Image (cartoon, rainbow, N blue to C red):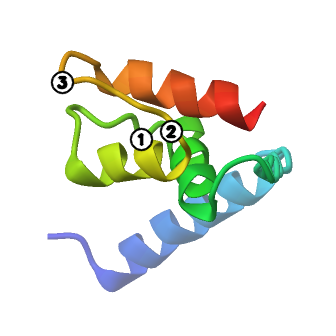
Amino acid sequence: MASDQDFAQWAALFVNAQSEVPTTPAPPSPTPASPVISTKVTSAANALLHSVDAGGIPAFVTSNLKQIALDNGIEINDHWTPNQIIEAIRAKAA
C-alpha cells in the first residue's frame, strides 16, 4: 500500500502539471435578444410568441391557445394545428 508521502508526491506532480496547462478564457455567453413586443396583439399573445421563439411550440391546441387567438380577433376552426394558430397570431402581430 502506498504511503501518505507517495501520495503527496504524486499530488504535487499532478498540481504542477495542471498549473502548467495554459487555460483559455471561456467565450462570453451571448446576450439573449429582447423579445419583440407588438402593440397589435395582447400581452398573452406576445408572451406566447416569445415562448414559441424560445423553442416552446405547443404539441396540441389547448383552450388557452384558442382563447389567445379569439382575444386577438382570430377566428379558428377545429382543424387548425397549433402552428397555424401561432402563425396567424404572428401575422396579426407584424
60 sits to left or right of 39: left
Label at residue 78? 3
Name the residue tied to disc 2: 52
Quarter holding the C terminus is top right
Locate residue 10, reporting x and y percent: 47, 64
Front position in the image: 35 or 21: 35
Question: Which residue is the extreme one toward the left?
Answer: 1
Distance Cα–Cα, label 3 vs label 1:
22 Å
> Do the numbered discs 2 and 1 sit on residues whose CB atoms are within 8 Å?
yes
Image point 23% across, 35% down: which residue? 61
Question: Which residue is the extreme one toward the bottom?
Answer: 4
Image point 39% across, 34% down: which residue? 57
Q: Could you tell me the amino acid type at mark 2?
A: Val
Distance Cα–Cα, label 2 vs label 1:
4 Å
Name the residue tied to disc 1: 56
> Do the numbered discs 3 and 1 sit on residues whose CB atoms are within 8 Å?
no
Secondary structure type for disc 2: helix
Front position in the image: 47 or 65: 65
